[in-house]
């Protein structure tokens, strides 16, 4: 006869310290319950921000003194409430699925025919193919080869942990490409100043990660552990207001709390501001996790969460799928953005000339009307290849404006799904070609342009306009018709023609090469006055 080993358990929530011996309690969790919970979670976070984030963003709006940054935050808040009302994506980039799973050692899967990875993938597949709210498939297999779209956003990136207990804890997050692209890692020396590295690093990230958001910092472990901690940390609730209140009361802070507050204050003192336009708030919160590390090293990772912060936590206890409570719309700040018809200039894209473009000024607010073309990385690469071969392009770009966007598919009466801008710097290497060989006269995208693009814009007396990242549903409401006019096989990366009405943009680079993403943060860093400003060293 084989003896059965018993375990010692504390009675859950019992105030008394007594323990008793019994066999481990097993919890049966159905395969379908995990799959459906994951599917529901990714649908939920596509249109609901975490309310703690919205509250923090509303407070930042009230504090903001920079008109450009305040306007950008107003667009983000308005877009968030519209997405919650319409159950449509907050951002056109509906992200790559990321899941943290903590599985109790006393969990049993009695009917499982799939691995946990396969269950999660099936949940992601259902979520992204939901006919009422289809999400944009943006995961590519063979990443350094054919880069073929998997069409269902699988596989998800899943991190597993086996823990004591008989329940399953799940975090689902949708990580967009803009914020992911700005993740940073450094192997510092133990004597290096961690905060100094962060303060020097954040400005190099540009605004493609769509501030204001959250910064996660992972310290210690090994390179991959540091990066994982940085990413996991940003799934925690925004509670910087509590930390600031604690510090103001004179209560002693832990070393981690001191570090969080120091980073928060110094990053905001850089003056980067919402969308990189210059302002008081660049980050809403800073999260830190650490782990013991080798004596010779100090691994440090930094991962941002953008203005489209999307994650949710849920718990499976064997009673069925997770129940995700919808937030109340009354919980959103009372902020409604509308086009500023007094200070903004209406532009007719159908009659736009190079002379008009050359006359625009940095920071000028425009409302675009008429027809514009779209195009992202894949379309630009194909255009470059066709021009090199002397082939005729499918569309004429002469005196046209191009919008860097990959929209979500439309549903019901929509002409196009959420269609916010993508990071413009990815198109920098194509900018001179487009301006000098296709007849293009201007561009719309997200955040700043790099030196090569600015030089091309200046040389060709063009201009670059910025739309607000994190306001995709709001922007899409300005699009009155949409049709594919080139490269249909590229899916969301095809060339569309949009007919827009009062689409809000800001002149971010004018015909003289003046860039508001340079002048704005400089102005506000000097105005805040906590970090001495020095001109960046040219490389």
Image (cartoon, rainbow, N blue to C red):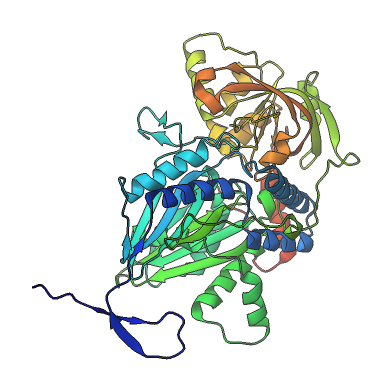
Numbered circles on residues, count: 0
- Residue 431 lies, with reference to residue 159, above or below; the image says above
Residue situated in front as seen by the camera: 390 or 288: 288
| Residue 377, horizontal then vertical, whole percent | 52, 29
Q: Is residue 512 above or below residue 285?
A: above
Is 421 left or right of 216, judged from the image as shown?
Answer: right
Residue 411, image x, y percentages: 64, 31
Q: Nearer the viewer, residue 125 or 519?
A: 125
The residue lying at 55 percent from left, 51 percent from top is 205
Q: On the rendered structure, is 173 left or right of 64? A: left
Q: Residue at the far front: name it.
A: 1
Q: Is residue 242 visible?
A: yes
The picture places residue 187, in percent across and down from the top left corner, at 37, 61
Query: Which image quarter is the N terminus in?
Result: bottom left
In terms of image quadrants, where is residue 113?
Answer: top left
Q: Is residue 537 visible?
A: no
Q: Residue at x 48, y 39 (%)?
A: 126
Of 335 and 113, which appears nearest the observer? 113
- Residue drawn at 55 percent across, 60 percent down: 215
Residue 150 in the image, given as x and y percentages of width and height: 42, 32
């Amino acid at each position: 006869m084989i003896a059965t080993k018993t375990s010692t358990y504390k009675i859950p929530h019992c105030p008394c310290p007594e323990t008793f011996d019994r066999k481990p309690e097993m919890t049966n969790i159905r395969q379908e319950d995990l799959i459906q919970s994951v599917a529901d979670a990714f649908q939920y976070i596509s249109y609901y921000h975490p309310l703690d984030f919205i509250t923090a963003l509303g407070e930042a709006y009230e504090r903001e003194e920079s008109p450009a940054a305040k306007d950008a935050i107003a667009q983000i808040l308005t877009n968030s409430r519209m997405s919650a009302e319409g159950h449509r994506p907050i951002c056109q980039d509906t992200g790559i699925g990321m899941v943290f799973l903590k599985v109790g050692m006393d969990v049993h899967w009695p009917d499982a025919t799939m691995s946990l990875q396969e269950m999660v993938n099936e949940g992601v597949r259902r979520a992204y193919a939901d006919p009422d709210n289809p999400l944009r498939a943006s995961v590519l297999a063979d990443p350094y080869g054919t880069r073929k779209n998997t069409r269902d956003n699988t596989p998800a990136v899943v991190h597993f942990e086996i823990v004591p207990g008989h329940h399953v804890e799940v975090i689902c997050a949708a990580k967009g490409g803009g914020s992911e692209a700005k993740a940073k890692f450094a192997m510092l020396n133990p004597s290096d100043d961690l905060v100094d590295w962060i303060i020097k690093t954040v400005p190099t990230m540009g605004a493609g990660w769509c501030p204001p958001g959250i910064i996660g910092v992972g310290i210690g472990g090994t390179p991959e552990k540091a990066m994982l901690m940085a990413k996991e940390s940003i799934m925690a609730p925004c509670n910087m207001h509590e930390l600031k209140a604690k510090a103001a009361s004179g209560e002693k802070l832990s070393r981690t709390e001191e570090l969080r507050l120091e980073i928060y204050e110094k990053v905001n003192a850089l003056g980067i501001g919402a969308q990189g336009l210059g302002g008081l708030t660049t980050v809403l919160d800073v999260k830190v996790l650490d782990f013991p590390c080798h004596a010779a090293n100090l691994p440090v990772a930094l991962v941002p969460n953008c203005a489209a912060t999307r994650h949710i936590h849920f718990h499976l206890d064997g009673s069925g799928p997770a129940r995700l409570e919808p937030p109340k719309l009354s919980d959103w700040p009372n902020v409604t953005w509308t086009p500023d018809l007094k200070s903004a200039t209406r532009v007719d894209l159908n009659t736009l000339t190079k002379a008009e473009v050359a006359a625009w000024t940095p920071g000028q607010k425009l409302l675009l009307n008429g027809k514009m073309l779209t195009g992202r990385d894949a379309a630009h690469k194909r255009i470059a290849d066709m021009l090199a071969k002397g082939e005729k392009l499918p569309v004429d770009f002469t005196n046209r404006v191009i919008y860097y966007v990959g929209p979500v598919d439309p549903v019901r009466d929509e002409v196009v799904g959420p269609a916010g801008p993508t990071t413009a710097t990815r198109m920098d290497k194509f900018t001179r070609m487009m301006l000098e060989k296709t007849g293009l006269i201007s561009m719309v995208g997200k955040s700043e342009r790099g030196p090569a693009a600015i030089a091309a814009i200046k040389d060709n007396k063009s201009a670059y306009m910025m739309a607000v990242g994190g306001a995709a549903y709001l922007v899409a409401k300005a699009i009155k018709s949409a049709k594919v006019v080139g490269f249909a096989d590229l899916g969301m990366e095809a060339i569309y023609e949009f007919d827009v009405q009062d689409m809000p943009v800001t002149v971010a680079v004018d015909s003289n090469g003046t860039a508001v993403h340079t002048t704005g943060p400089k102005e506000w860093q000097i105005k805040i006055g906590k970090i001495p400003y020095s001109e960046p060293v040219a490389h």
